[in-house]
């Protein structure tokens, strides 16, 4: 099995190899054209103006240089567009993350409020029970009942607050006002 080296995968060496092969093919074509031209025009020797070959070569390479410069400018323009698009995408992602974090903060505040309310209810019921035990009461009915969940209550039994009431009492601006400031 032949072993491959890193050079086999180098794009520059592959490109240069293709360039060399295409140059050899062009030279072969020019030789064939020259041979055909000589065979067809052996008898005809019209006066042909001398072509300044060094000048023709310089002009051909000038055109190639201008083409390469245009390609370089196009590549730079495309990279600039890609960078601007990436920056825009990053900005959108950051805004989405900010919105998600704010929603999580609001949810955490709601859960904390619910836990505090339930804790107060349990503490009140516990204090009532302790008072009854201290008074020696035989009545097993609690003096203070826990609030029963209503149909408009959340899963914890505490009525759900609207987004406006959640944001109004927190002292922090809502995510909409933050987005407007950007």
Image (tube, rainbow, N blue to C red):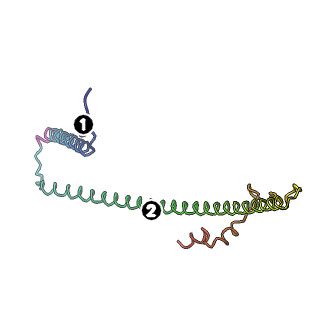
How many labels, in total?
A: 2
* Viewer-closest of 23 and 15: 15
State how far apart marks 2 and 1 are (Cα).
39 Å
Q: Position of residue 156 (x, y in %)?
A: 74, 56
Foreground residue, 112 or 22? 112
Dot 2 surroundings within 10 Å: few (below 14), some, or many (20 or more)? few
Looking at the picture, how far across and down is residue 158, in whole percent?
75, 60
Task: Give the answer, above or below, for where 16 lies relative to 88.
Answer: above
Q: Where is residue 101 drawn, in percent x and y?
A: 57, 61
Q: Residue at x 25, y 28 (%)?
A: 2
Q: Which residue was labeled with disc 2?
A: 87
In terms of image quadrants, where is residue 55?
bottom left
- Per the rendered image, the range of residues in magenta is 38-43
Q: Residue furthest top?
A: 1
Q: Horizontal placement of 78 versus 25: left or right? A: right
Where on the picture, by quarter, is residue 54? Answer: bottom left
Q: For the residue carrying disc 1, how many other residues have a C-alpha within 10 Å: few (<14), some (14-19), or many (20+)?
A: few
39 part of magenta stretch: yes
Give the answer, above or below, for where 170 lies relative to 112: below
Q: Quadrant of residue 162?
A: bottom right
Say which label, 2 or 1, has the lower sequence index: 1
Q: Is residue 24 magenta?
A: no
Tell me the element at label 1: loop
Residue 136 in sight: yes
Q: Is residue 15 left or right of residue 120?
A: left
Q: Mark on residue 5?
A: 1
Q: Nearer the viewer, residue 164 or 74?
A: 164
- Residue nearest the observer in this picture, 62 or 83: 83
State which quarter of the image contains the N terminus: top left
Residues at marks 2 and 1 touching, judged by CB atoms closer than 8 Å: no
Instruction: Kindly tell me whether residue 150 is visible in this rendering.
Output: no
Under tag 2, what secondary structure?
helix
């Amino acid at each position: 099995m032949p072993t491959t080296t890193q050079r086999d995968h180098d794009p520059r060496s592959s490109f240069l190899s293709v360039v060399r092969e295409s140059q050899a093919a062009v030279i072969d074509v020019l030789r064939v054209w020259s041979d055909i031209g000589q065979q067809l025009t052996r008898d005809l020797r019209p006066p042909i103006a001398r072509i300044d070959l060094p000048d023709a070569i310089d002009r051909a390479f000038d055109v190639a240089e201008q083409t390469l410069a245009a390609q370089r400018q196009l590549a730079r323009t495309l990279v600039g567009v890609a960078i601007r698009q990436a920056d825009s995408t990053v900005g959108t992602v950051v805004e989405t993350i900010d919105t998600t974090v704010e929603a999580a903060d609001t949810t955490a505040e709601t859960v904390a409020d619910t836990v505090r309310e339930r804790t107060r209810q349990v503490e009140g019921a516990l204090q009532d029970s302790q008072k009854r035990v201290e008074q020696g009461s035989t009545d097993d009915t609690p003096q203070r009942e826990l609030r029963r969940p209503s149909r408009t209550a959340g899963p914890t039994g505490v009525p759900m607050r609207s987004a406006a009431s959640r944001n109004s009492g927190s002292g922090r601006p809502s995510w909409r006002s933050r987005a407007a400031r950007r």
